[in-house]
Image (tube, helix red, strand yellow):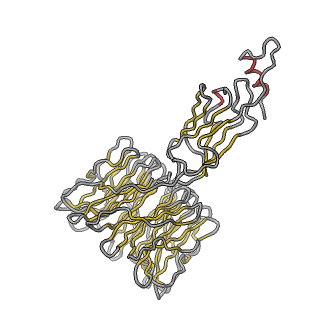
């Protein structure tokens, strides 16, 4: 509703109603915008502006009256230039790739006479997609080979990578950081135990860019223990590596997830003789400490292996793993509830008894705590890709579902990532009778799984795909592909708005050595960083490429 009393009061204050003069009652209008309405391919670092046709009362233009949103509101600052009558919205972060944004100027904006816009003024534009840059070496330690990289990105687009590296005598854990706008820093050692090797690092990050790395490390040369170190973004520094479990049997293959507040869940496989079990520990950010003791979360039925963990923004967690029941390997899950600070009971989430579950399962969680687990499993004839979904509102798993329809050859190694609203992309490798290919399928909340599609068409061996998904549901998949000469790093792009994959492209052109063990991480703006191990003919190094 128009505030005529306010308008009249402003007019009086400005001395416009004097000597019987008739005040201006014409509403202001927007003469132009940038970006213009309905334009596409807009740079993602753009500012959004609106030009008015007359002088505007500056105090009415602020973060309430000038807003920008896609699915959610965009954080940013609003300014107004009274000389040019241009209002400017500057986003805090880079806008998301290929996403439509709507800008709104509220009818509470007035001219100097108190006249408001006739109605809210709105327009929309669509951002451009990103592109890959050039591959770059991100570590220069030539003493020995580097291996097993793991990467995460924070909401601002900064990234942290960890890997294991041979120093000539043992394996160490190293890290490097990418800062948006500045590039990569210098690789640094983040553990200092000089007695025995450290291996298989994994990393997770919170919304402020603080990261937690975990790895397995031998203290006595006999069995591994699980260690951790934390990166603090505000001081740009790592702490001191700390032991996070004190059980004497050997622990290995740690994984870690972090919530929005920086609390973390670490999970690993531990040999408790005669069986392996799944153990966990929790890091509490407010005390900067891990729990006093680790906790077993697997069922007491048979050997449990290959755990994976996903943590939602509130701190609830899902752990999945493969476990032997005396006849088959099955897929089990357990859930941590932050409100009660407790784990539940290990639960079977698949019931196919014709053959064992294989390999390493994977799990991802959305902003509401819903999770999807994926794995590969034999049906007695070949291995297929299966999935099951946990619904947080009902605290229950659904029924395991087959998510591929190709029956030619074995499918293996599924990997999953999920957008904030719960839509997901799964990728895997599959034999077509002659070679391995990289495939994908998409889950849409309310609709279910789609049809599996081939995401690379090269006449070459493609394997070990990984995937990352942005908040709009766009995805980047990467994999290793052998053209008959050497394995190389490849990628493809999924666009949610058109429900389509693009054309696979090569990420690196180093023809001297093999590329392998690709990992991918996508930030909230749709930028992505791929990292991999590459042999240059002499040693193995860690390389990276950025999509933006």
Residue 384 percent location from the top left of the image: 48, 80
- Whether residue 192 can be seen here: yes
Q: Which residue lies furthest to the right in this view?
A: 20
Query: Is residue 201 placed above or below 34 in the rendered structure?
Result: below
Query: Is residue 410 placed above or below 22 in the rendered structure?
Result: below
Quarter of the image where the N terminus is located:
top right
Q: Which residue lies furthest to the left in this view?
A: 169
Residue at the image point whose x is 58% and y is 51% from the top: 40
- Whether residue 300 can be seen here: no
Q: Quick one: 506 or 527, which is closer to the camera?
A: 506
Q: Quick one: 540 or 121, which is closer to the camera?
A: 121
Residue 231 percent location from the top left of the image: 35, 48
Residue 50 percent location from the top left of the image: 62, 36
Q: Which residue lies furthest to the top in this view?
A: 19
Residue 526 percent location from the top left of the image: 49, 54
Q: Quick one: 458 or 516, which is closer to the camera?
A: 458
Query: Is residue 481 placed above or below 356 in the rendered structure?
Result: above
Left or right position of 288 against 538: right
Q: Quadrant of residue 539?
A: bottom left
Query: Is residue 181 placed above or below 314 in the rendered structure?
Result: above
Figure label count: 0
Residue at the image point whose x is 38% and y is 41% from the top: 234
Residue at the image point whose x is 60% and y is 46% from the top: 73
């Amino acid at each position: 509703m128009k505030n005529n009393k306010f308008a009249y009061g402003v007019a009086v204050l400005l001395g416009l109603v004097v000597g019987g003069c008739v005040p201006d009652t014409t509403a202001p209008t927007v003469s132009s915008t940038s970006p213009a309405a309905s334009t596409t391919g807009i740079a993602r670092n753009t500012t959004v502006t609106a030009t008015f046709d007359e002088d505007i009362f500056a105090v009415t233009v602020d973060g309430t009256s000038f807003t920008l949103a896609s699915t959610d509101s965009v954080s940013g600052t609003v300014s107004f230039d009274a000389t040019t009558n241009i209002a400017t919205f500057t986003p805090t972060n880079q806008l998301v790739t290929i996403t439509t944004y709507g800008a709104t100027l509220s009818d509470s904006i007035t001219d100097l006479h108190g006249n408001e816009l006739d109605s809210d003024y709105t327009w929309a534009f669509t951002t451009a997609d990103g592109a890959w840059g050039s591959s770059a070496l991100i570590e220069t330690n030539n003493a020995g080979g580097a291996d097993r990289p793991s990467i995460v990105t924070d909401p601002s687009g900064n990234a942290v990578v960890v890997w294991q590296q041979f120093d000539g005598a043992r394996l160490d854990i190293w890290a490097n950081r990418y800062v948006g706008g500045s590039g990569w820093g210098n690789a640094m050692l983040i553990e200092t135990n000089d007695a025995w090797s450290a291996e298989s690092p994994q990393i997770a990050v919170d919304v402020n860019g603080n990261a937690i790395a975990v790895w397995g490390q031998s203290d006595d040369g006999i069995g591994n223990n699980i260690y951790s170190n934390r990166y603090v973004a505000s001081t740009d520094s790592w702490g001191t590596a700390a032991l996070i479990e004190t059980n004497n049997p050997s622990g290995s293959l740690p994984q870690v997830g972090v919530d929005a507040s920086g609390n973390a869940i670490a999970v690993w496989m531990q040999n408790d003789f005669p069986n392996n079990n799944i153990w966990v520990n929790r890091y509490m950010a407010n005390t900067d400490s891990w729990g006093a003791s680790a906790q077993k979360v697997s069922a007491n039925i048979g050997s449990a292996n290959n755990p994976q963990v996903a943590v939602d923004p509130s701190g609830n967690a899902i752990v999945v793993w493969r476990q032997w029941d005396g006849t088959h390997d099955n897929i089990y899950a357990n859930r941590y509830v932050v409100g009660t600070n407790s784990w539940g009971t290990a639960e079977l989430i698949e019931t196919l008894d014709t053959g064992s579950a294989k390999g390493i399962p994977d799990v991802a969680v959305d902003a509401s705590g819903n999770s999807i687990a994926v794995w590969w499993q034999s049906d007695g004839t070949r291995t297929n890709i299966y999935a099951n979904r946990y619904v947080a509102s009902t605290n229950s798993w659904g029924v395991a579902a087959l998510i591929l329809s190709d029956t030619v050859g074995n499918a293996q190694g599924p990997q999953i990532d999920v957008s904030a609203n719960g839509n997901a992309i799964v990728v895997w490798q599959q034999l077509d009778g002659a070679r391995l290919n990289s495939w994908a399928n998409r889950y849409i909340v309310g609709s279910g799984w789609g049809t599996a599609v081939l995401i690379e068409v090269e006449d070459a061996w493609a394997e070990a795909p990984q995937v990352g998904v942005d908040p709009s549901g766009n995805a980047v998949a990467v994999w290793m592909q052998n053209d008959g000469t050497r394995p190389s790093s490849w990628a493809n792009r999924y666009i949610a708005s058109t429900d389509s994959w693009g054309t696979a492209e090569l990420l690196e052109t180093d023809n001297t050595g093999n590329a392998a063990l690709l990992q991918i991480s996508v930030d909230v703006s749709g930028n992505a960083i791929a990292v991999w191990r590459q042999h240059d003919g002499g040693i193995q190094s860690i390389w990276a490429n950025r999509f933006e």
